[in-house]
Amino acid sequence: MDFEMTKITTPVTNRRDVLAAAGTLAAAAFASPAIAQAATSPAQGMGLSPATISQRRKLGTLEVSSIGLGVQNMSRTYQTTVPTRSEMHNIIRTAFDRGVTLFDAAEAYGPFEVEKILGEAVEPFRNQIVIETKFGWNLDLETGQMLPPGLNSKPEHIKQVVEAMLKRLRTDRIDMLYQHRVDPQVPIEDVAGAIKDLKAEGKVLEPLDELFKDEVRAVGRVLGLPDRVVNRHPFPGPGLAVRCPGEVTAEKLEIIREADKIYIDLLHKHGFYNKVWQAYAAIIPTKTVGVKGDERCYEYALSLRAVTSEDAMTAEWVHLPHELLGEISSKILNEVKGVNRVLYDISTKPPASIEWE
């Protein structure tokens, strides 16, 4: 069956998702026995313990500790306490001894000095940890003075910054590099091209950025990622719970998974998946009356959503063909247990958001 889709005209961020969930608390706990004792109660309340630090997670291809240590303030002085370099080294090394393998810095912290402190502290065990640092400011490479216009992500500047970072960090590569602030004057493709060159030289392993979804796709194309990855529909960071308003249960989530697979598979089959910016199935948190066989039933209703967008700030619903919607609905009703009604969401953003929660 061939379908045609009515074209809709669409009018023409964020990371920080993993690092240092308890950076300040961790630093306090590593500083001295007295401070560690004072921090015991809040740490336990947050579920942070030596056992937690032994857990691992994946960031791209890198495996790191579940908690990272941010060293942003290690070059600052305060009214009552002036931190010494040796004390900062001790905090970093004690964190490593307790299982922390992810350390976060930035050229702007200090500026430059924090990267130097981190490089000095981790030099003995550099190959056992992951270092993340950031570029994006227009800092004088010698003095650290902020220069107008404040931001600078020009490719040549990025490469110069990375060379300076490598020296300060006493290393031959930066495990994770991301853009501290997006420079609106530089196309994201140019930024990605510079990072691609640095990756090819082995100076950067994993690039991260604070990008909108369309910019992530642009970067993916520059880096040569396969189309199936670049064009994959966005998936909500909090998971399927945002497509399950009200109480979240295993039964509801399984219904969503099964219905969503049918929906997406049929979009692929009929050539609509790449014409739609995002599509998914959501469950409506109430049961409706229906008839199955010779008996009345009370089961869930599902809502199908399909939108076109450029950057998720605005979105238009997609005019999928009635025949295709009918096929999707029929298959869901016949194969997904617990559903007796399928609806199609024709709301724009604004006022509706793309996701339900």
Image (spheres, rainbow, N blue to C red):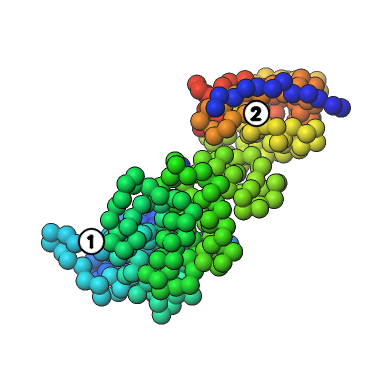
In this view, the residue in front, 164 or 26, is 164
Image position of 189 (left or right of 179): right
Residue at 69% from the left image edge and 22% from the top image edge: 7
Secondary structure under badge 2? strand
Q: Position of residue 181 (x, y in %)?
A: 41, 47
Q: Position of residue 263 (x, y in %)?
A: 72, 33
Q: What amino acid does circle 1 point to?
A: Arg
Residue where numbered disc 2 is placed: 306
Image position of 122 (left or right of 278): left
* Residue at the bottom extreme, as displayed: 124
Q: Which mark is residue 120?
A: none
Q: Position of residue 275 (x, y in %)?
A: 70, 32
Query: Does residue 28 sit above or below 282 in this rendering?
Result: below
Q: Residue 37's image quarter?
A: bottom left
Q: Residue 324's image quarter?
A: top right
Disc 1: CA contacts within 10 A as few (<14), some (14-19) or many (>=20) = some
Secondary structure under badge 1? loop
Label 1 or label 2, whichever lies nearer to me, is: 1
- CA distance separating discs 1 and 2: 50 Å
Q: Is residue 32 visible?
A: yes
In this view, the residue in front, 75 or 45, is 75
- Is tag 1's residue or tag 2's residue first in the polypeptide sequence? 1
In this view, the residue in front, 356 or 120, is 120
Residue where numbered disc 1 is placed: 76
* Quarter of the image where the N terminus is located: top right
Image position of 38 (left or right of 186): left
Q: What amino acid does circle 2 point to?
A: Ala
